[in-house]
Amino acid sequence: MTRRFFIRFLGVVAGIVLLPLRAFAARPGTAFDSTTTEDALTQLYGTSDTVETDRITIKAPDIAENGAIVPITVKFDIPDAEFVGIIAENNPAPLTAGFALSDHSGGLVSTRIKMSETSPVHAVIKAGDTVYRATKEVKVTIGGCGG
């Protein structure tokens, strides 16, 4: 056995052993394929009924110069929060991001989303049997979803 063959063999074995250790995100199937906000909420949470709350704060630009990169930060003070969804209502696919939370997750998620046009952005949080929502209007000057 040559040294080169042995090193390749170790690489293959390490790849097979370490592959299961990689974390893969679960995708809530049809929710991301929905074309309306109500359908996305129903697919994601089982209901489109939400409770407006001031315990959720959305930090986003009032005017996004480029809809391809819109930074969104959601801070919340909701005990037992299970899932955070970010919905840009006027996008072709409104559900732009989703975060499954563990028991020890803090009350903050941050990401960048694409927006095709000016739209209300909803942060929707499920905690127990209740779905909470906060909304902020974001104006887009150049669309990021192919527009």
Image (cartoon, rainbow, N blue to C red):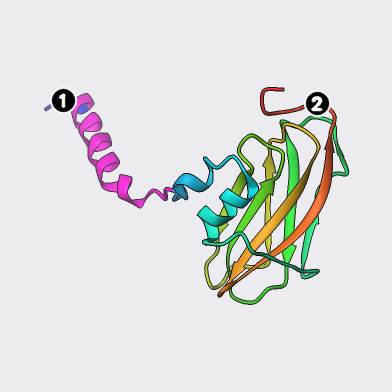
Q: Is residue 77 left or right of residue 32?
A: right
Secondary structure type for disc 1: loop
Front label number (2 vs 1): 2
Frontmost residue, 116 versus 48: 48
Q: Which labelled disc corresponds to residue 122?
A: none
Q: Tell me where residue 2 appears, x and y as whole percent.
A: 16, 25
The amino acid beneath tag 1 is Thr
Residue positioned 67% across, 48% down in the render: 87
On screen, residue 114 versus residue 81, left or right, reads right
Identify the residue at image location x=83%, y=47%: 137
Query: How far, Cα to Cα, is label 2 from label 1?
Result: 58 Å
Helix, strand or loop for disc 2: loop
**Location of the N terminus (image quadrant):** top left
Give the residue pinned by disc 2.
142
* Magenta residue check for 145: no
Look at the picture and state if 145 lies above or below 135.
above
Compared with 133, 104 (above or below) is below
The mark nearer the N terminus, 2 or 1, is 1
Q: Is residue 32 left or right of residue 38?
A: left
- Helix, strand or loop: magenta stretch: helix
Q: Tag 2: residue type?
A: Ile
Magenta stretch: residue 10 in it? Answer: yes
Residue located 71% across and 44% down the image = 89
- Characterize the local packing of mark 1: few (<14), some (14-19) or many (20 or more) Cα atoms within 10 angstroms: few
Viewed as shown, does residue 59 lie left or right of 83? right
Which disc, if any, is residue 2?
A: 1
